[in-house]
């Protein structure tokens, strides 16, 4: 089984924290861009070596800016080139202010069965600060419209640790999302990525990053409230009602091959990783001329081991020690356990059913633990 990711780089406006490749210009190039993406889907069909497509994820950017012609082009190409008979999950990311009954009626013409909605916060002042186009009421209304349209599998994205955000504001966000009770919730700590307006604002001392303890308090509150509400904490930043995890994102953490098409999209086949150029025009021109602009790297045994450790420890299941030994041998298996031993002694890691995983307190220092288990190159 394999997955396909399609990147849509167009946005009406840019959020101050976003470091994903996108553009607020060139919306007139939408159809030409989608033609290029469809051509890439066709010419790169051999990449997945005949594996059945289990998931499709249309992300961005703002995929909810796509019109009927673009969506039809994408899905006709997917069906003709790969077949979607065995596809369990097809996700599209949407902005709340793009959601209308008319647009949902359009989406229902295609085999999309999962909606990922970027809400980020239900606080109107914070939404304005981060330059989101919707307000809280629009987000709530958009969610209900999706439910009324028949979409049962809906995910909501939230961000915590915003400048000047109080614990009370974050608690209100959690209460509001739980009142909607979506199948899936993704919640991320705000990061200051170089090249973003937010990064520049911090550099100029216009905003101050929240302290580590406050961020931990927000995360702890999130885990407690969602657990009490019956959500499974299946990955560090992701929660779901029983069995409603994101099949597509889970494939990343389980190292399942995926093909990424579009500007800046990444692909992975187990042995190497590829990524397309992060430039709309050069991407289009390259595909049109049959000379795709991309880079790739072969993954050494050490790199594959490190990726396995990093992705597995992000999940509640943790590292399958039997699989670790099968993939990387006894020496690497023993090394992993040896490096994990101090963390098990202090209660930050545990072994259950032959899976090595982070404990509740270990989640708070996951980055440090993961780096400790990485390979040591000679």
Image (tube, helix red, strand yellow):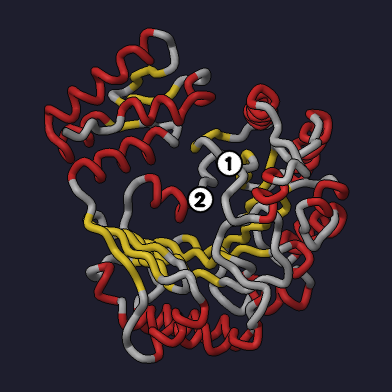
Query: What residue lies at 42% left-to-right and 78% top-to-bottom?
Result: 78
Residue located beneath label 2 in the image: 246
**Residue closer to the observer: 206 or 64:** 206
- The reply to whether dot 1 and dot 2 touch (C-beta < 8 Å) is yes
Q: Is residue 173 above or below residue 228?
A: below
User: Tag 2 or tag 1, which sits nearer the N-term?
Assistant: 1
Residue located beneath label 1 in the image: 240
Q: Which x, y percent locates residue 323?
A: 22, 36
Q: Which x, y percent locates residue 338?
A: 24, 18
Quadrant for the C terminus, please: top left
Is 352 displayed left or right of 93 in the figure? left
Q: Secondary structure at mark 2?
A: loop
Q: Which x, y percent locates residue 31?
A: 57, 88
Is 190 displayed left or right of 268 in the figure? right
Q: Which mark is residue 13?
A: none
Q: Which x, y percent locates residue 144?
A: 78, 58
Quadrant for the N terminus, please: bottom left
């Amino acid at each position: 089984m394999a997955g396909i990711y399609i990147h849509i780089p167009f946005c009406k406006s840019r959020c101050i924290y976003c470091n994903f490749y996108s553009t607020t210009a060139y919306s007139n190039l939408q159809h030409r861009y989608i033609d290029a993406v469809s051509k890439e889907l066709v010419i790169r069909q051999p990449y997945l070596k005949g594996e059945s497509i289990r998931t499709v994820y249309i992300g961005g950017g703002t995929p909810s800016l796509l019109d009927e012609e673009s969506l039809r082009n994408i899905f006709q190409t997917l069906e003709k080139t790969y077949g979607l008979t065995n596809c369990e999950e097809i996700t599209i990311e949407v902005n709340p202010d793009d959601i209308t009954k008319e647009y949902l009626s359009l989406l229902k013409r295609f085999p999309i069965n999962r909606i990922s909605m970027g809400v980020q916060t239900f606080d109107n002042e914070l939404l304005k600060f981060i330059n989101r186009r919707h307000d809280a009421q629009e987000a709530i209304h958009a969610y209900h419209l999706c439910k009324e349209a028949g979409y049962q599998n809906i995910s909501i994205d939230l961000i915590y640790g915003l400048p000047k955000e109080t614990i009370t504001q974050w608690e209100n966000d959690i209460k509001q999302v739980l009142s909607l009770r979506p199948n899936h919730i993704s919640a991320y700590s705000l990061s200051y990525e170089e090249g973003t307006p937010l990064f520049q604002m911090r550099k100029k001392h216009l905003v101050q990053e929240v302290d580590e303890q406050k961020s931990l308090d927000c995360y702890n509150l999130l885990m407690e409230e969602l657990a009490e509400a019956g959500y499974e904490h299946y990955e560090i930043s992701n929660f779901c009602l029983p069995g409603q995890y994101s099949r597509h994102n889970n494939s990343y953490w389980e190292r399942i091959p995926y093909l990424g098409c579009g500007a800046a999209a990444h692909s992975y086949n187990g042995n190497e990783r590829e990524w397309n150029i992060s430039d709309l025009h050069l991407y289009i021109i390259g595909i049109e001329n049959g000379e795709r602009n991309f880079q790739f790297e072969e993954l050494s045994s050490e790199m594959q081991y490190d990726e396995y450790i990093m992705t597995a420890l992000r999940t509640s299941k943790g590292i399958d020690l039997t699989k670790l030994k099968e993939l990387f041998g006894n020496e690497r298996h023993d090394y992993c356990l040896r490096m994990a031993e101090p963390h098990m002694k202090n209660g930050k890691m545990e072994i259950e059913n032959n899976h090595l995983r982070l404990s509740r307190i270990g989640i708070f220092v996951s980055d440090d633990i993961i780096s400790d288990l990485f390979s040591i190159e000679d």
